[in-house]
Image (tube, helix red, strand yellow):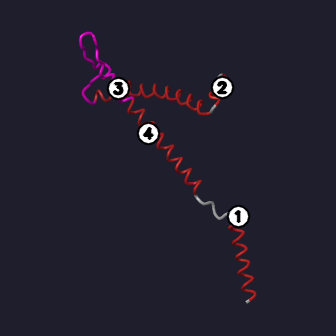
Amino acid sequence: MIKEFKEFISRGNVLDLAVGVIIGGAFNKIVSSLVDNILMPLIGLIIGGVDFSSLSFKIKDAEIAYGLFIQNIVDFLIVAFTIFIVVKAVNKLMRKKEKKEEAPKGPSEEVLLLTEIKNELVKQNKKNK
């Protein structure tokens, strides 16, 4: 079991996943800061000086903080859009790479050799006539 675990851990996919999770966590903090400290105050000013972080209402002893929920929706939309842009760019690069691999690289050595032989035979035929 330990040997299998070592093999699993040493695979590149696991390391890529770990790096992705760490970068994703850091990116999430940046997006949250952007939304909380820049976008939501600007949106609040535009719609009349509303502070979204303080928007809430109470039902008996429970406080429903719908302003924070709105901020989290904005966070999600920014992260989702950014991921969409990154995936779209990667897909575009992959398509270009596939097209380059599919593109003919010119005639093969065999075709070139056969063409030379054909040309030589044509020359010889013209000399014999």
**CB contact under 8 Å: marks 1 and 2:** no
**Residue 41, image x, y percentages:** 33, 26
Magenta-colored stretch includes residue 101: no
The disc label shown at residue 109, or none: 1
Which region of the structure is painted magenta? Answer: 46-75
Q: Nearer the viewer, residue 74 or 118?
A: 118
Measured in 3D between alpha carbons, the distance from the residue under mark 1 to the one under mark 2, in whole angstroms, is 46 Å
Q: Nearer the viewer, residue 106 or 77?
A: 106
- Amino acid at circle 2: Lys
Tell me which corner region of the image, top left, top right, bottom left or bottom right, holds residue 78. Answer: top left
Q: Residue at x 38, y 33 (%)?
A: 77
Tell me which corner region of the image, top left, top right, bottom left or bottom right, holds residue 128. Answer: bottom right
- Amino acid at circle 4: Phe
Q: Residue at x 59, y 30 (%)?
A: 14
User: Which of the marked residues, 3 or 1, is nearer the chain's N terminus?
Assistant: 3
**Residue 74, image x, y percentages:** 36, 30
Q: Residue at x 73, y 74 (%)?
A: 117
Is residue 123 placed above or below 20 in the rendered structure? below
Is residue 126 placed above or below 5 in the rendered structure? below
The disc label shown at residue 84, or none: 4
User: Which of the marked residues, 2 or 4, is nearer the chain's N terminus?
Assistant: 2
Mark 1 crowdedness (10 Å alpha carbons): few <14, some 14-19, many ≥20: few
User: Which of the marked residues, 1 or 4, is nearer the chain's N terminus?
Assistant: 4
**Residue 102, image x, y percentages:** 58, 56
Say left or right for 18 vs 121: left
Which tag is nearer the camera, tag 3 or tag 2?
2
Q: Which residue is mark 2?
A: 6
Tell me which corner region of the image, top left, top right, bottom left or bottom right, holds residue 116. Answer: bottom right
**Residue 98, image x, y percentages:** 56, 51
- Amino acid at circle 3: Gln
